[in-house]
Amino acid sequence: MPSGSTLHSATPSAYSSSAEDVKKVVTVELQEKGGASALQNHASYASLDDEWITDPSNPRNWSLRKKWTNAAIVSFYTFVSPLASSMMAPCLLQIAEQYQVTNQTILAMTLSIFLLGFAVGPLIIAPISEMYGRRWVLHISNILFLFFNIGCAFSPNAGSLIAFRFLTGLAGATPIACGGGSISDLFGEKDRAAAMAIFTLGPLLGPVIGPIAGGFVAQSIGPKYVFIIIAGLSAGAGFVGIPFLHETYAPVLLQRKRAGRGVSDAEKGQLNILPTRREAIYTIWLNIRRPAELLTRSFICFILSLYMSFMYGTPF
């Protein structure tokens, strides 16, 4: 039986992301369960990983058409949510008049509270997507994003608008949290640059296009339709994404492949690479703790975060 250090030795460059993800889960097992169980799990998956490198179901072995279809859908998801962050900015005076808001802080909060959801969401959503896959995390969040935007459109008062804006930001953070991982699942290091360039157009162009489009919409048909249009874009993304977006996360695909082999229940217990409840709690806690440590212990990270919070939180 090899020692624990063997698990952390360098893997061949031909390995896809699946082998790295399996090793990551094994590392958690080593920390939580002890070395024997993790080593047995890793050894049992060694042959499966070797096959996975050339397996047609490996996302990195998909056709270019299938890869770029998935990348385009994820990129569109990533465009819609940043668009919503700033599209209502030109409507603030009309919103203040509609809801009779005289406090400038409350008025600014209707816009900037969205970013609080953007900040909190990835802490939970990112580890969930790494435990249960990207596809349905993206779809469910997109559906919630749609309904929360409808809630913003028909909010009866400023308080409910602020609450729905926060929930919209929480759901809209999913493409930002999972999108980069999806692109990494699809493309190797040599082919990833072009896909990442397209993916990052969403966060870059969304906040720029949003105020321009929002100004025209608010002036012509009213601020309520800003949220309705965003909900419509979200519905369009879901209409295309639900049938055509495929799961790309290797541990989930490996789990399905293993389940299709007809292994016994005992083998299923040994080969289970999806996390137990204890591992899930540990993974979520690790992903919450890490950014908190960076924010409080890194001066550069703190200053950049302070600057970005000021820029995004200033409505005028």
Image: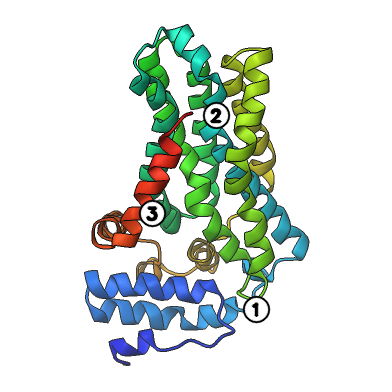
Identify the residue at image location x=47%, y=8%: 97
Query: Quarter-wise, where is residue 161 in the image?
Result: top left
Three-letter residue code for mark 2: Leu
Identify the residue at image location x=61%, y=12%: 222
Position of residue 266 relative to residue 299, above or below, is below
Query: Which residue position holds label 2?
Result: 146
Q: Earlier in the sequence, mark 3 or mark 2?
A: 2
Residue 54 shows which numbered tag? Answer: 1
Query: Which residue position holds label 3?
Result: 304
Residue 49 in picture, x, y percent from top left: 52, 79
Residue 71 in picture, x, y percent from top left: 66, 55
The one nearer the camera, 65 or 229, is 229
The one nearer the camera, 134 or 173, is 173
Q: CA distance from mark 2 to mark 1?
A: 39 Å
The one nearer the camera, 186 or 43, is 186
The local secondary structure at tag 3 comes to helix
Q: CA distance from mark 3 to mark 2?
A: 31 Å
Instruction: Categorize mark 1 by other alpha carbons within 10 Å: few (<14), some (14-19), many (20+).
Output: some
Q: Earlier in the sequence, mark 1 or mark 3?
A: 1
